[in-house]
Amino acid sequence: MSPLTPPVETRSPGSPAHQEEAPAIRPARRPRAAIGRPRTRPTLGLALGGGGARGFAHVVVIEALDELGVRPAAIAGTSIGAAIGAAYASGMTGKTMRRIVTNLAHERGETFGRLLGARASGLRALLAAPFGNLMLLDAEKLCAAFLPSLIPATFSELAIPLTVLATDLYGRCAVPLTAGALRPAIAASMAVPGLLRPVTIDGRVLIDGGATEPLPFEYLRPKVDMILAVDASAAVKGRDGKVPDPWECLFATLQIMGRSILKEKLRHGGPDLLLQPNVGTFRLLDFLRGTAILRAAEPIKEEIKEKLQALIGV
């Protein structure tokens, strides 16, 4: 696959027409089998981007792959995409992930209890600090509280090779993590500044991978024949002209920067298939609206089946 092959971009029905214009795209060519040799299915790589709660849309894509009987040869994930990618690489099905997502909303008391247990500091320490952040969570505690037990301790135990993207805060660069302890890597990839405390791995202070790699499809190029990437960040939307609160403004700003990075990367060559579920009406922290997010992303399922059948002949 040429790195200059632009993506086949799809959006769910009902996607807003005012979203920013994507770079010019054309369908990727399907690889030809060598003469005299039996045709084999191209290997597929799966890249899952960030987007907070909107990333629950990745579950619908995985369900579609399950129904097609397609299993990626490699996975790369950023932030929520790293967590869902790790679950998938561990052997979890899309249906199992769907049950976990819906339980977050249906068991709110337990969910809030886990969040309280994941605070970065106790109340006394927060009150003693001059600028204590009552919302600051410990990324590693959060992963311990919410990641499924099926996700193993190390990368080497995964059934599918996984690349987790984080950002070196002081090195100002992306950090692809592929070996060693898995859960701290996921925690680092999800460490959104101001919300989750950074994670230190091998002497590096790491934060949210979306700061440098909002959709890490490039890390799959040497490993597979074709790449499917899922961008669940969606365009930032206002709400009836209301001024957003400080947290919503911060997260919207991060999304704008992430989409600018992605737009530039796509100009230099994108994945073979780019999916953008229609989840723009949801906010970054709408984790208790998981059922609604899954429902909004559902139309993408038929699109991915149609496009993959054309690309790899499933």
Image: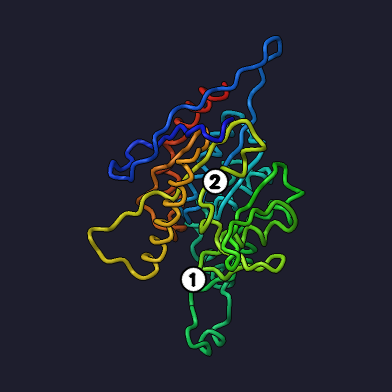
Q: Quadrant of residue 189?
A: bottom right
The residue at 56%/86% (across/down) is: 125
Q: Quadrant of the N terminus?
A: top right
- Is disc 2 surrounded by few (<14), some (14 to 19) or many (20+) residues within 10 Å? many
Say what amino acid the circle numbered 2 marks.
Leu
Above or below — where is 211 with respect to 310? below
Above or below — where is 168 with respect to 133? above
Q: What is the total number of numbered labels drawn onto the structure image? A: 2
- Give the residue at the far bottom of this rendering: 128
Tell me the residue that label 2 is attached to: 48
Give the x, y percent position of residue 167: 58, 60
Observer-nearest of 285 and 217 = 217
Observer-nearest of 229 and 220 = 220
User: Image check: 26 left or right of 136?
Assistant: left
Q: Quadrant of the C terminus?
A: top right
Give the x, y percent position of residue 119: 56, 74
Say what amino acid the circle numbered 1 marks.
Gly
Instruction: Find the distance from the CA under tag 1 to the CA under tag 2.
Output: 23 Å
Tell me the residue that label 1 is attached to: 194
- Is disc 1 surrounded by few (<14), some (14 to 19) or many (20+) residues within 10 Å? some
Give the x, y percent position of residue 275: 46, 38
- Give the residue at the far top of this rendering: 36
Above or below — where is 289 with respect to 65? below
Q: Secondary structure at mark 2?
A: strand
> Answer yes or no: do the residues labelled 1 and 2 have beta carbons within 8 Å?
no
Instruction: Name the colour scheme.
Output: rainbow
Give the x, y percent position of residue 202: 72, 65
User: Image check: 9 left or right of 153?
Assistant: left
Observer-nearest of 111 and 284 = 284
Q: Secondary structure at mark 1?
A: loop
Q: Earlier in the sequence, mark 1 or mark 2?
A: 2
